[in-house]
Image (cartoon, rainbow, N blue to C red):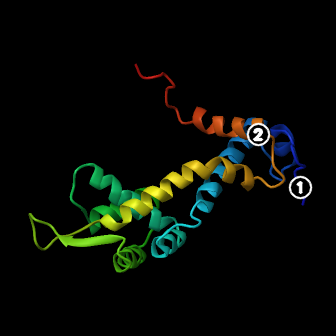
Amino acid sequence: MVKIKSQASLKDAVGNSSMNFKTVDQGIDILAFSAAIRALGLSNRDLEPKKLSNYIRSGYLQIQLICAVILFQFKGYSGVSRDDLYDAVCEVFPLTTYANFRKVLRTGVDNEIFIRSRAETDSRRTLYSLSDEMLEPICTYFLSILSDFGVLYSQVIEDGLSNNDIYKLLSRITKNTGLKTDKPK
């Protein structure tokens, strides 16, 4: 295994890789996004309460459930039905089995991350919403991702790159989002 030397350039990092990239840009893009995903996964340290931390650490399905419920509630819904929530999760993870989804959702309810209630319009329908007690811990979690992201991002790349190259990687992610960078008036 060839290790990247400390303060290697991005071009060296791509060249020293055991992957056969077609271009240096392709290698930089893959490095940028892989490091970002890994850094996001590492950002769940010291999160309280531990039941939320353990739930999030259990897998990507758990954080997708939390985010899907939050996004439904931001649309003004008091909660989201299990079927609508399953559809939202399957948009991200199409091979999610309904049985696994239900088990993970039930664990979230058992740990009081989600609240299960009856729909006002149809009492046969169950809605899931984020527990009010989870608002502060989730806000803390999301803010810690942002505040620690640069440090985590640079630590993910073993033997490190220069701060300038780390910035280039992060800029690459921003550039590839397709969003216009016009400043709001």
Quarter of the image that includes the N terminus: bottom right
- Res 89 seen here: no
Residue ranking furthest to the top: 185
In the rendered view, tell whether residue 59 sits above or below residue 106: above
Q: Which residue is mark 2?
A: 163
Q: Point out the frontmost of discs 2 and 1.
A: 2
The answer to whether residue 183 is left or right of residue 152 is left
Q: Residue at x 65, y 47 (%)?
A: 150
Label 2 sits on a secondary structure element that is: helix
Mark 2 or 1 closer to N-term? 1
Give x and y (percent) for residue 58. 53, 73
Give x and y (percent) for residue 124. 13, 74
The answer to whether residue 175 is left or right of residue 87 is right
Q: Residue at x 35, y 80 (%)?
A: 110
Which of these two is toward me, 4 or 15?
4
Q: Residue at x 22, y 50 (%)?
A: 76
**Numbered mark located on residue 3 in the image:** 1
In the rendered view, tell whether residue 164 sits above or below residue 44: above
Give x and y (percent) for residue 153. 68, 50
In the rendered view, tell whether residue 36 sits above or below residue 106: above
Q: Residue at x 10, y 65 (%)?
A: 120
- Res 137 seen here: yes
Of the residues shown, which amino acid type is indicated by label 1? Lys
Of the residues shown, which amino acid type is indicated by label 2? Asn
**Numbered mark located on residue 182 in the image:** none
Give x and y (percent) for residue 52. 46, 71
